[in-house]
Amino acid sequence: MIRITTSVVAALLAVNTAGAAAGETRATEAVRAEAREILRASVAMQTSEGRGQVPVLAEYLAGKFKAAGFAAEDIEIRPHGETASLVVRYRGSDRHAKPILLLAHMDVVEARAEDWERDPFVLVEENGYFYGRGTADVKNEVALISTTFLRLKSEGFVPSRELVIAFSGDEETVMETTRDLAKHLAGAEFALNGDGGQGVLNDQTGAPQVYFIQGAEKYYASFELTARNPGGHSSQPRADNAIYDLADVLEALRSYQFPVMWNDWTLGNFRETARVTPGPLGEAMAKFAADPRDATAARALSASPQLVGKIRTTCVATMLRGGHAENALPQAATATVNCRVFPGTPVEEVRSTLQRLAGEKVEVKLIGEPHPSDPSALRPDVVGAVTRAVHLNYPGVPIVPEMAPYATDGSVFRAAGVPTYGVSSLFIKGSDEYSHGLNERIPVASFYAGLDYWYSLLTQLGGSVH
């Protein structure tokens, strides 16, 4: 695991942003209109699993790039079953320089229109927000990155190194297109992930508080816990019952906590976030950052659903099935347990812990293939460029390292050897965070500010030749 010393973190967070930075030209109304139209069209396409609409979105975006003058051989739609991924190469002047990848995903989680206050697949602008499925996760970034490519092309920009869009098509489910992209684009210098990191607005005032740059993620691993039994007639109940045996294990899992863990991304995060977090929770963050062996601070952080994942591996039951008839004793009962595993923890260690909790009566089996990844190194060029880009619209906001307690496409690229940084343009209140939920929305002002952000970021890191 890569270690980042406190002194390095402090130095990077103090990046000098005085003076004019590359790419500070603001987006015109025409550029804003283009971005809004791409967002509108993207939201209208129901790109959740099984609907076959991801290829339609990929074709729509490919048409935009072709019309802007990108060569046909630089635009690639990679089919994968009912979904697809999209690769767009913005050729650079130095063909020997390693490219920079730009990540986002075109798929979304399902949305039941009858449950929403507005049609989830119609972009609605209301009271300073854009509403619609995918507006926050992450069709906003798909639209912003795409529009920035179109804008740069129209201006005759030639990067010094190749910039490559890599939009996946099943990030919300099995990430097979992501793994394909990671193999296809291996050898990149690094990746900028629009589906990680982000800025935080104060819930009461709306003032910008902090920006998180993400350089590490927990990885995703699911297990099936199965209790088996010969069964029998329900008129002759016995103490040995598959459902009861499974229930005992789930009760043990509910009370179990994995050991406290930390790395420099999490300690740096708590150290800086404590300064803008009032009350006991902020105090616990500061104490944990100063001494992660402080058991009282760890207990306070573990009590928060938003923070427990930053200090421990977590496992939670998410699905149940069992029995075969209402008048028969169950022959099997199975629970799916989803774990978010702290970087550096082997998946077998997690499985063994679950098996120990389950005992001999319940079998624990890993589902699928996890993709553990170590944290990326904090690069001064990336942190500096992100800092300047953020400060265009949010001057002075602290840039803080973060380890995400969940997994995105970034975890797959890190596992493939591509350092990856979550650098979403979004600034949002915690109370407005509805990704995966009802009435998903983002601030309109934040969306348009993202155009300036991505333009600055790409012209800085991509270099400029006119």
Image (cartoon, rainbow, N blue to C red):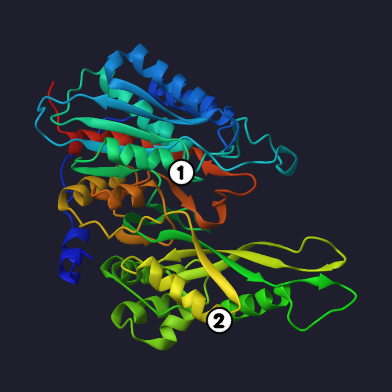
Name the mark on residue 359: 2
Residue at image position (29%, 68%) is: 268
Residues at marks 1 and 2, CA–CA distance in whole angstroms:
34 Å
**In the rendered image, is residue 453 in sight?**
no
Q: Position of residue 444 (x, y in %)?
A: 50, 38
Which quarter of the rendered picture does the N terminus lie within? bottom left
Residue 131 lies, with reference to residue 317, above or below; the image says above
> Quadrant location of residue 183?
top left
Q: In this orientation, does residue 378 appear?
A: yes
Tell me the mark number nearer the camera, choosing from 1 and 2.
Answer: 2
Q: Is 302 left, or right, of 318 in this rendering?
A: left
- Disc 1 residue type (three-letter): Glu
Task: Provide the residue designation for mark 1.
Answer: 171
Residue occupying the point 23% across, 31% down: 163
Horizontal arrangement in the rendering, residue 381 relative to residue 303 (left or right): left
Local crowd size for mark 1, using a 10 Å CA cut-off: few (<14), some (14–19), many (≥20): many
Badge 2: residue crowd in 10 Å (few <14, some 14–19, many ≥20): few
Give me the residue at 41% from left, 50% from top. Answer: 408
Residue 229 placement, left or right of 42: right
Q: Position of residue 64 (x, y in %)?
A: 40, 17
Indicate whether 425 appears above or below 345: above
